[in-house]
Structures are given as C-alpha cells and as structure tokens.
Amino acid sequence: MRESIAVKLWLLIVILVSITLMVVGLSLNTLLEDLYFDIQARAMIEQGRNIEQIMKKVTSQEELSYQINTISSFIQGHIMVVDRKGMVGTCNPGMPMQPGMNLSCEEVDEVLKGSIIIRKGRNFGFEKSMLMVAVPVQEQEEVLGAIMLFKPVEPITKTVSDFRRLIFLTAIGAIVLATILSFFLSRKITKPLLKMNGFAKRVAAGDFSGRVPVETSDEVGNLAKTFNFMSEELEKAEEVRKQFLSDVSHELRTPLSLLQGYAEALSDGMASTEEEQKEYLDIISDEATRLNRIVDDLSDLNAMEAGQLTLNISEFHINDVLKSIVRTFKPAAEEKKVTLDLKALVGETPPISGDQGRIEQILINLVNNAIHYTPAGGKVSLEAQYNGDNFIIKVSDTGEGIPPEELPYIWERFYRVDKARTRKKGGSGLGLAIVKSLVRAHGGTVTASSKPGEGSTFTVTLPRKCKTA
C-alpha cells in the first residue's frame, strides 16, 4: 500500500497543504496580533485627543476628575494627567499613582517633549501587563502636559487568542478537507494509470487488443493516447509478423516439398533413365537456387529495415548502368519476343553519387518483372531524365497491368497481384519490397502507376548525391 502512487500523491498533497497552512497560520497570527494591538493603540490615542479637548473646556479640577473617571470606566482602563513638570494632576481611583506624585521616567520625559509614546508591559507600578499610550497636551506648539492612558493587555491578548484558536480550527478543517479532496484527486489521477498498468501487462502477455479510455486532455490523457497508439502499432506489427511467418513458411514449403519429393524419387530409383535423373537433378538444383535466393532477399530486407545496410558510395554515370541492364536482359527479351527499348540521357549530365551495385539491383528487379509480365509482342521501355537535382528513371511495360485496388500493397513482402500464380512463375515475391527499401536507403522515392490491360510504369527518383536514410 505504501508503494502505491495514489498514496504517495495523497501524502504529498496533504503534507504540502499542511506546511502551507502552518506557515500562513503563523504569519497570520503574528499579523493579527500586531494589527489588533495597533488598532487598540490608535483608539487610545484618539481617546487621548478627546480628553485633551475636554480639558480645554472644563473650568474646574473637580469637573475634570469626574470626566476622567467616567471615560476610564467607559474604556475599561486608567487615565492619568501630568503637568509639564511630570507631576500627576488627575488620575482615576485604583491607580498606583496619586495626584501630586512627581513622575520621572523615560516615557514621561519623551511625551513632555511632544512625542506620542506607546508601550506594552508592566510599568508605572501596575501589577499586570498594560498597554500604555501617552499623548502630549499642546497649545500653540507648547507642551503643557500629557495624558496617559492604560489598558490591561489581558483582554486584548484574550481576543488575540480567540483569533488564534479560530485560525487553528480553520487550519485543521482545511487540512481535513484537503485530505479528503486530495485522496479522491489522487485516485482520479492514478485510476487511468492503473488501467494502463493492467493493459501493459496484457500487452506483455501478447494481447494487443486492449485500449485505455481517454477521459482527459491533460498529460495523463496524452499518455493514454500514446499507449493506445503503441498498442495499435504493436498489434499491426504482430499481424505483420504472423503474416510474415505464414508467408515464409508457405514460400519455403513448395521448394522444400519438391526437393524432398525428387530426392526420394531418385533414392527410390524412380528415375529409370539418365535423362529422367538429369531432369530430377535440374529441378532439385533450381529449387535449391530459389531457396537460396529467398534467404538472400530476406537477409537484405532485414538489414535494410534494421538500418544495417552499408552502401558503397561512388560516382558513376547512370547511362552506363542503363546500357548494362539492357545488354543483360536483351537475350531474355528476344527469347520472349518482347521489345526492350532504352531512352538514355541526352547531352552532358553529371554523374550520380550512390551504390552502383544496389542501383543496378533496383533496375534488374523492375526490368525482370516488366519482361516477366509482358506477353509476346509487347514492349518494355527504360527512360532516364535529369532535372538538375534528381535522376528520374522510368520502367514501363505493356503487360497485363495492376488493378488500382492492388497498387498500395505491391510493396509488401510476398505480395502477388495474381493469387493463383504459382511461386515458380511468380518469383520470391520480395523483389518490389527490396526495390522500395534500396531506393529509400539512397534517399529517393519509387512510385507505381498502372492501367489493367495496358501496362504499368514504375518511376524511381534518386537524388544526384545519395542521401542515406
């Protein structure tokens, strides 16, 4: 339980809220205490000013004493009036000082100089801590005396304590509320993570069909989208893997069956004449060669897709490659009565930078397919162009063509347009997949266009300088 991210997140939020409320509470407590004492002091100063105005209006000492006693009862404090020499003139009963006493202390000296004095603590003989405010009595900037007001600190501190208690209870309530809310918040945040954890375990077990519900648009929601995208890609990869294994096993089954069958026939002496023996041996040799070609093609494809194919880059003229291809396929084209035409580059063109052997492999695959699927009397054309940045090579034929719905899939491994065509007639089914990978390795592109019954055109675009993928 302690390792749960929900619990950790919940504890983190509670601790942060508690620390924040503690700091705010302490600061607010100090601020309120200072503020309340300041408010009381200002009120006492204002009361002192009022008493000063009363003193200027009264006509006798008895009337002044009466007014001071009344006001002291009202403010629940003590009031004392001293003259300019520091002698107590009037004070309310119950004070340690008495009229006629001479006061000599720092506070009295300062107030008689015209300053307003505020003190807190035990002073002037009071047994309890007092808040004292001394206000000078002035007339035309001359200090005639001072009015000193005293209020017990205890009622003030009691009010501050009430505020402090209220702050504490509020903080406790806020922490409890934050605890509850943070618990549900942490559960809400971690709920999709727990779901992703469950789906991740299913993915690890090989089940890629699960999808995490995307309930938010925040980081957790984006993580869920990414997880779903990963699951979809893994599901596709798994389907491709299964299809690949199925295709490989299917491709290898025919030649292996032929090899086994003819080898057993030879072993059982079914080939009675030398001609039959030679025929059986030729079939075994052809199927072994085809097996070897499939293995080599698969090895090349895996190296390309893993980014492990090494290109031997050099500069050469594309016309030389095209002419070599035509010379290579001319006998096969003549044997099938197919015209092989070349439209080479005209004029001076720069050499291309790339792997000459791999570019020849690209064109061999395309031309071989074109001749293979073009009937007698048809035509296969090679055309080269240069636009200043790229070399464009087109291989066209007047064969049976490719249905539009099949075009997107012709680059896949072992894909054949004619499902009924035998493996022997159709090659390994890897040629176009190799073409696409080799072109991409050079930083180029390859596209196909076709009209059923009219033929197909494969267009290879290669940069003048190889841009390895």
Image (tube, grey):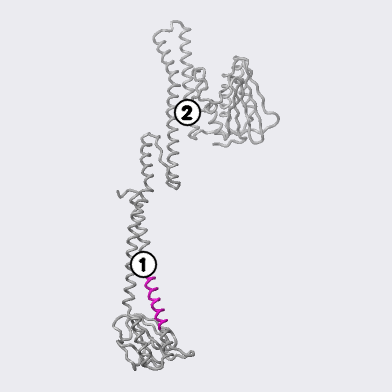
Q: Position of residue 153 (x, y in %)?
A: 33, 78
Which residue is at a point 34% across and 62% down the rendered structure image? 171
Per the image, label 1 sits on a secondary structure element best described as helix
Q: Are marks 2 and 1 in contact (CB under 8 Å)?
A: no
Quadrant in the picture for the C terminus: top right
Residue 122 found in image quarter: bottom left
Q: Position of residue 220 (x, y in %)?
A: 42, 46
Q: CA distance from mark 2 to mark 1?
A: 73 Å
Which residue is at a point 63% across and 15% down the rendered structure image? 377
Looking at the image, the residue that sits furthest to the right is: 347
Q: What residue is disc 1 on?
A: 26
Which residue is at a point 52% across and 33% down the rendered structure image? 310
Q: Position of residue 72 (x, y in %)?
A: 35, 84
Q: Nearer the viewer, residue 243 or 78?
A: 78
> Which residues, given as a range, are shown in magenta?
25-47
Mark with earlier residue (2, 1):
1
Vertical order, 398 against 3 (above or below): above
Q: Nearer the viewer, residue 78 or 297?
A: 78
